[in-house]
Image (spheres, rainbow, N blue to C red):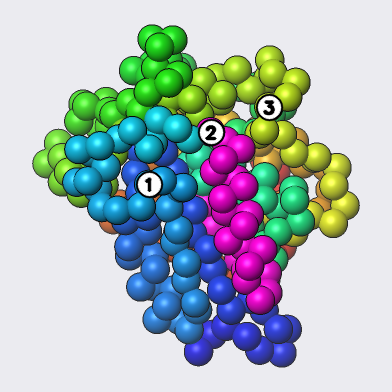
């Protein structure tokens, strides 16, 4: 048992998945943290209950999602818990964690290959190419849009072989809500965006950014810029060499899971490079 102790550290971890996948993407992490004595929750977005195959057959619930709906959904889950949990989010799940911490929810937050919040201005070319299959058609704002395997391989699993990438695609990939992608693309033009935080908030829980060196869709430089925006509280950043956007599932994910938990248990600021 590694959970509560002298410091009364959190005994619950909430895992928040990203776009184009489901909570299945956390399957190894759930077992990993449960083996260490934690209660682990990996809820899906509202309406996305069910298995990957079912969501591929009927993706209509995915099309209805927005940033606000997803964040409110997770907020309601976390507010019902008896104590504040550790929040860990991947990709758009990282955005959700940032927004939840801004609401005062969570004892600590870890964001992995996070999508940015309002105020982060960098738009890497690899990100543009990764999201182009959705953003190229304005009508996709009302649709759930899947990646082809080739698109998934570029955006998610670019360090994997064709065979390894195909295996990941078949096991995890579903459509993504176009509305959220378009919200993200216009985030800095929309004064009313739901993806806005107070970078000067004094009572925010500690926040740790983890990035993959070879991530195409959410590059490390983007995550570094996001981390630098914070002007208060404990904020740290770490880049993992050789990792892509599939960092939570590719070989060596245990190192990332361990780093996330160790930091969340004992948050320390790390100077930005």
Please identify the quarter of the rendering in which residue 205 is found.
bottom right
Alpha-carbon distance for marks 2 and 3? 11 Å
Q: Are marks 2 and 3 in contact (CB under 8 Å)?
A: no
Q: Name the spot of residue 76 as percent of width and height, x first.
A: 62, 57
From this view, report whether residue 90 is shown above or below residue 14: above
Residue ID at (67%, 45%): 99
Q: Are marks 1 and 2 in contact (CB under 8 Å)?
A: no
Q: Are marks 3 and 1 in contact (CB under 8 Å)?
A: no
Magenta stretch: includes residue 72: yes
Residue ID at (35%, 28%): 144
Q: Name the spot of residue 150 as percent of width and height, x first.
A: 21, 26
Whether residue 127 can be seen here: no
Answer with left or right where residue 165 lies relative to residue 258.
left
The segment highlighted magenta reads 66-90
Secondary structure of residue under mark 3: loop
Q: Of label 2 and label 3, which has the lower sequence position?
A: 2
Q: Name the spot of residue 212 as percent of width and height, x first.
A: 45, 43
Disc 3 designates what residue?
193
Q: Of label 1 and label 2, which has the lower sequence position?
A: 1
Please identify the quarter of the rendering in which residue 169 is found.
top left
Whether residue 43 can be seen here: yes
Which of labels 2 and 3 is toward the front? 2
- Badge 3 crowding class, 10 Å Cα cut-off, few under 14, some 14 to 19, many 20 or more, is some
Answer with left or right where residue 170 lies relative to residue 173.
left
Residue ID at (33%, 33%): 60
Q: Looking at the rendered structure, which numbered label has been put on residue 66?
A: 2
Which of labels 3 and 1 is toward the front? 1
Disc 1 designates what residue?
48
Alpha-carbon distance for marks 3 and 1? 23 Å
């Amino acid at each position: 048992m590694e959970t509560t102790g002298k410091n009364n550290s959190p005994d619950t971890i909430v895992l928040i998945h990203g776009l184009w996948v489901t909570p299945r993407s956390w399957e190894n992490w759930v077992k990993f943290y449960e083996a260490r004595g934690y209660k682990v929750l990996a809820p899906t977005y509202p309406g996305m209950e069910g298995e990957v195959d079912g969501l591929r057959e009927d993706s209509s619930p995915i099309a209805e999602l927005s940033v606000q709906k997803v964040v409110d959904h997770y907020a309601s889950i976390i507010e019902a818990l008896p104590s504040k949990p550790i929040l860990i989010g991947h990709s758009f799940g990282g955005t959700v964690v940032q927004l939840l911490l801004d609401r005062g929810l969570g004892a600590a937050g870890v964001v992995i290959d996070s999508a940015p919040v309002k105020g982060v201005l960098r738009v890497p070319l690899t990100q543009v190419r990764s999201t182009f299959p959705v953003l190229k058609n304005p009508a996709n704002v009302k649709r759930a849009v899947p990646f082809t395997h080739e698109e998934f391989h570029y955006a998610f699993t670019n360090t994997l072989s064709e065979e390894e990438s195909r295996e990941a695609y078949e096991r995890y990939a579903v459509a993504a809500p176009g509305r959220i992608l378009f919200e993200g693309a216009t985030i800095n033009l929309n004064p009313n965006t739901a993806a806005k935080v107070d970078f000067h908030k004094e009572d925010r829980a500690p926040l740790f950014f983890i990035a993959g060196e070879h991530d195409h869709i959410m590059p490390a430089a983007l995550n570094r810029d996001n981390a630098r925006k914070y002007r208060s509280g404990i904020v740290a950043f770490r880049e993992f060499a050789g990792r892509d956007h599939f960092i939570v599932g590719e070989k060596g994910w245990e190192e990332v899971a361990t780093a996330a938990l160790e930091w969340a248990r004992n948050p320390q600021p790390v100077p930005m490079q």
